[in-house]
Amino acid sequence: MQALQPPAAAPGVTLVLGAGGGLGAALVQALTSRGETVIALGRQTQPALDYRDAASLACCARHVSDQLAQLGQPLVRVLVTTGFLHGRLPGGEAAMPERSWEQLDAAVLGHSFLINAIGPAMVIKHVLPLLPRHGRCVAAFLSARVGSVSDNQLGGWYGYRASKAALNQLVHTAAIELNRRNHSAICVVLHPGTVDTDLSRPFAKTGLKVRAPDVAAAELLAVVDGLTPAQSGGFWDQHGAPVPW
């Protein structure tokens, strides 16, 4: 997918990974409506973002690097919106969040960690080096409040909780390293709240505040735009409030 050309005054390029999902697509739309340059990659784009194929991450990074060179603009935001909570495994088996340890399954756990933690870790490896060494830039990875260890009062959802907790640690660690390259860089995990997408729709309970993807995208961009380097390495919700680890 080609980058979308903004007015000359745009501050730089935003990369959205997982752009085919409900929230990822809404973020692309919100950014382009602001006149910003967006490179949008997902499972159906060319090149394709496929966490099951380690080479695809390097290919996507080369594509982004080439686009940046053609545009002559820096990469100022990386928004990683990928995630797995339920659905089909690569072999076709159905997977749902575990209600009890009796439902723990190695294949489901492995896929959860691949999509929610290992894939984003490879994004850290291949994409974060494309961020500039000077000036403000942001890398934001979508996590979930259920990945908070201290906030876990209900149990269940073993794979999703644990893989998102792993993502939180990976991003926190990357933020430390990124700061050594660029003191103005920001690297965070974000909790987007409950959004009306395929990922959360089966679990949206009556009375729970569910927001449309465009509303959630606007909230997240407001948080991203307001973050400071002092908040790098943190875990923030859709209102900019800290989420406990």
Image (spheres, rainbow, N blue to C red):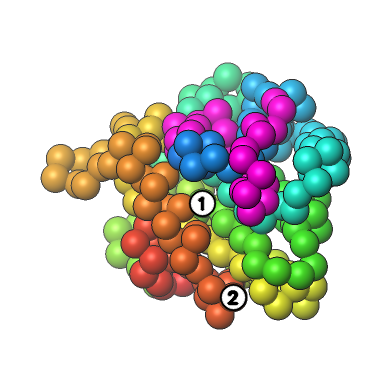
Which numbered marker is on residue 10? none
- Which residue corresponds to mark 1? 142
Q: Which of 81/168 is in front?
A: 81
Relative placement, left or right, of 136 versus 122 is: left
Image spot of residue 172 (x, y percent): 62, 69
Relative placement, left or right, of 81 versus 217 is: right
Give SS at disc 1.
strand
**Dot placed on the residue nearer the N-terminal end, 1 or 2:** 1
When the figure is inspected, residue 111 is found, relative to residue 225, above or below; the finding is above
Q: Residue pushed farthest left?
A: 207
Q: Which residues are magenta?
A: 1-29
Give SS at disc 2.
helix
Image spot of residue 51 (x, y percent): 70, 37
Q: Which of 74/194 is in front?
A: 74
- Magenta stretch holds residue 166: no
Residue 145 appears in the rendering: no
Foreground label between 1 and 2: 2
Amino acid type, residue under disc 2 in the picture: Pro
Q: Residue at x 57, y 56 (%)?
A: 140
